[in-house]
Structure formats: structure tokens, C-alpha cells
Image (spheres, rainbow, N blue to C red):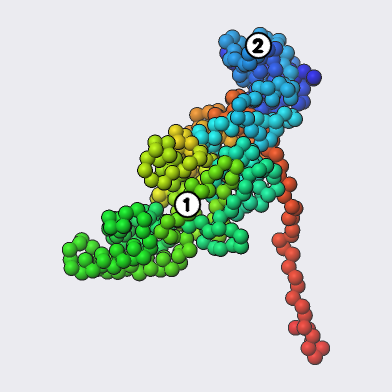
Amino acid sequence: MERAGLVVESGGTQCTIKVTSDAVETGSILKLGKAFGIVTGMRFSEDEKVGGRHTLTAEVQVFGETTGKGIKGIKKPLEPYTKAYPASVGELEGLLDCLDKISFGKVHGTDARAFVNGGEYDRHTAILASTGAGKSFLTANLIKEYSLKGLPILIVDTHGEFQKLLKQMDVGDSVIDVHTVGRQRQGMEMFTIPVSTLSCHDFTHFTSLNENQVHALDMVLNKVYNTKGDKYSMDDVLSACDELAEEAEDNSKKIHVETANALGRRLKGMARSFKNIFTVDGTDINSLVEPYKITIIDTSLSTQGVRQSVVSYISKKLLDGRINKKHSLEGETVDNVVLFVVEEAHNYGGASLDHSCKRQLQRIASEGRKFGVGLLVVSQKPSKIDEEILSQCNTGIYMHITNPRDKDHIRRSFESISDDIIKELDSLDVGECIITGAMVKLPFLLCTVDKINMPDKKESKLNFKKPEKIKTAGFDY
Ligand SMILES: Nc1ncnc2c1ncn2[C@@H]1O[C@H](COP(=O)(O)OP(=O)(O)O)[C@@H](O)[C@H]1O
Ligand SMILES: [Mg+2]
């Protein structure tokens, strides 16, 4: 194998090599004597020690050396003039080998499968990149890999694209179950949300309410809860609202009759518009979470408010159900562990969002691991996502990102990311990603994500038919 270079400077776990092969790039994994290292950056230098002008050097982070029983950290710097070679396919796959290995691509520039530790799904993962970088393809690949291992998966599919993507892939024995929200589609079940999961602020995403009306609604919801418990219908809410208006007339409550009446009118409008969506019981989440099952909740035809309620409801049910299961508590259980996939996560865990879905996602992010609920958040606007949620994602998968604000937010939110990696995010091509954190043993891994063969749909957008001219009495019209 062609030599990659020669160690010219070394200290701690860092070393600099003089590069002698075109194959060396940032992210390349090298074998240096018994040790392995990853190229974290490259530059041309005129340093005399290197000998000669404009010599290409690479900074290498040495992450371990082979012993008889695997790999362990190095305790002293590498000797100068150690020869560096590109790690072979066998060596790379050996390095990345682990118990629950899955792979959604190849180690960049090689034929080695980029194995990551799927067992870390419950320590949460974030996929962050600009639009068009390949997030959805990567997410679909990841879902396929998990489901081949049987992990139950629940996806909130904002763009209605995962059924099509997963159909092009081999998901083995897994069943793909699609539920639609709001609109009936042939052969698909409807996913419904219980009214009782909506907080008074959540209602403001469906109908405009002023501060007084929100306050009155809070009283209404408390009233329904006190009489009906945690299962009630929209009609129950409407009756409680009428009662509140009557009580207001008696002046026994600190609420204006007009406020209560206006609230009633708004709620009636909402009940009409969302009658297929908000029900008493909602869909039974436990039946959606099964091994070898991928459940897609297609929210592509719903409003943002409905999607947020879907995320809020599912998150709450999953975590509460798992807590009940683990501690054998009364109430509904979710019998299996699960990976919950949330695309467009900035819409549900937005830093400035006031919706219960954000609090529910925060709960999963901080407590989910103990109960077997893993979160996979996907977003093109990392800087808009609540830091509490992002910082709980122990694995970061980054694709092409240029926005400095997004990069800054990522740097703040993730312990495992270094400035070297941040600098590289600009230069990633479509379908290339950097993985860092819990799922990889290496400081980071540069990976080319497997392509999904989608039917080619390249069509001109500006291909209009000319209107036909009508001839009447020898004139064109
Ligand atoms: N791993 C990949 N290999 C090759 N092409 C890819 C890959 N991932 C994405 N693409 C191309 O980029 C396009 C956008 O990918 P997509 O996953 O939808 O991006 P995003 O979700 O980040 O907006 C795809 O339609 C496909 O043509
Ligand atoms: Mg996408």
C-alpha cells in the first residue's frame, strides 16, 4: 500500500505528518506503526523542519494502538519518522467493530463499511445540515438499519417522504405502517389526538386567543379535568365554557361574560375545523411500537399546530408509557423500547416556542434513556433548537452546513465536537457526513452515506403549454 506520509513532529496524542500521498484528506484514518490516528486538518507549510518549501502536512490525532486484545489509548507520543499508511479495509472495519453495529455508509474514500454503535440510540442523536445536504436520505438509511435489528421506530413525517424512501430500501421482515393525520387516505388509518393533551397555550395554535381568553380557557380546562378526569371531548370543553359564561354572569368568578362567550365562539370554530383530529381517546400508541415495525405518522397535510400536537401527544405517551411499564405503575404502558424520529425538529423544540411539545421533547431528551425512549432529531436550523434538547443528544451527525450562527450553536451544544470538525462542515458534499459522539469510538468519522435509488423525477419547472390561438373570420385571437 502506498505510504501516506512520515511523522515529523509529535507530542501527546497529536502528531504532524509530512504527506506523501494524494489519498490523504481530512478524515483519513492512518496506521502509524502500531497506532491509529485520524487526520483532523491539513496545510501547506514552509517550516524548515519539514525540509523544503510548501510542503503539505497533516495534523493527526492518534486515538489508540493495537495490542493483543484490541485497541487502547497511547501513553507516550509517537516516535518521529514513524511511517504512516492508510488503514486497510480490514483494519478500518476492525476498528469500528462493536456489538450492535449498524452501518449507513462507507468510511469516506474507502470501501470499508462505516460501522457505528446502534446500541447508543437511547442516548439520542441529532442530524444537522442545510437543506438538500442529504438529511432525509441519511435518516431513511438509519431507520432501515435499526429496523433490520428489530428496533421499534415511530416517525413524525412532516413532508410525507419516508414511505417512498423506505420502499426503495430493503427493510427485511419489518412492516411499514402509515397513519395519516387530518385527511383520510385509502388503505391508511387515521391518527387522532386526544383533546385532553392540549394545554391552554396549545389551543392558541388552532384559534387566535388573547391573554384573557387563554386565562379563561385555563379555568375551563381545570373545570373539565375536575369533573371528567383526563379523558374528555371537545364537547365537554364547550359545555364547561358555557358554564363558565353563566357563572360569570352570576359574578361569582373573576371573568368577564364577554371573554367567556368569545372563547366559546372560538372553541366552536376550532371544534368544527379539527373534528377528525381531536378525539377523546386518541390513537393507542402502544400498538404502534413493536419490534420489526416502522410506524410513519404522515403529517404532510396537517397544519403546524396539529403537527406540534402530534409530537406532544406521542412524546408524552411514549415516555409515560415506558415509565409505567418499567415501574409496573397503573395506567397505560408502552411495552417496547422505541426510537422516536422527529424531522424539522426546530418546529417542535424551538428555543422560543411556547407549546407543550417542546416540554415533552425536553423530557424525553433528559429522561428517555432510563426508560428506553431514544430521540432522533433532524433539522436544517440547528440554531433555532432549544439547547437543552440538543445538548442531550450524545451523537451528532453533521452534513454540509455554512451558516456561522448554526455552527456556533452546534459548538456550544455538543461536547464532542471540536473546532477542527466545525471547520470541515463547509466542505462536505451532498451525502457526506461527520459522525461524532457516543456512536463512534473514534474522535470522529467521515462517512459517505449510501445512495437510495429514487425514480428520476427531473422535470423542467418552466415547461408551460402555449394557449391555442382561435381563428375567427380570418383573425387570430
Ligand atoms: N447519500 C447520498 N448519495 C447521493 N445523493 C444523495 C445522498 N443523499 C442525498 N442525495 C441527493 O440529495 C437530494 C436531497 O437529499 P435529502 O435527503 O432530501 O436532503 P435534505 O433532507 O437534507 O433536504 C436527494 O434527492 C438526492 O438526490
Ligand atoms: Mg429532508
Quadrant containing the C terminus is bottom right
Task: Answer with left or right where residue 388 lies relative to residue 449.
Answer: left
Q: CA distance from mark 1 to mark 2?
A: 52 Å
Determine whether 173 is above or below 108 in the image: below
Q: Would you name the residue on which mark 1 appears?
A: 284
| Residue 68: image tag | 2
Quadrant containing the N terminus is top right
Determine whether 439 is above or below 319 in the image: above
Question: Judging from the image, what secondary structure is the residue with disc 2 in?
Answer: loop
- The kind of residue tagged 2 is Gly
- The kind of residue tagged 1 is Asp
10 Å crowding of disc 1: few (<14), some (14-19), many (20+): some
Q: Residue at x 69, y 25 (%)?
A: 93
Q: Position of residue 274 (x, y in %)?
A: 46, 64
Q: Residue at x 65, y 14 (%)?
A: 66
Q: Position of residue 225 (x, y in %)?
A: 30, 55
Q: Residue at x 48, y 36 (%)?
A: 372
Q: Quadrant of residue 198?
A: bottom left
Q: Position of residue 163 (x, y in %)?
A: 63, 51
Determine whether 103 is above or below 355 in the image: above
Q: Quadrant of residue 171?
A: top right
Task: Answer with left or right where residue 351 lies relative to residue 126.
Answer: left
Q: Position of residue 414 (x, y in %)?
A: 50, 32
- The answer to whether residue 234 shows anywhere in this view is yes
10 Å crowding of disc 2: few (<14), some (14-19), many (20+): few
- The answer to whether residue 10 shows anywhere in this view is no
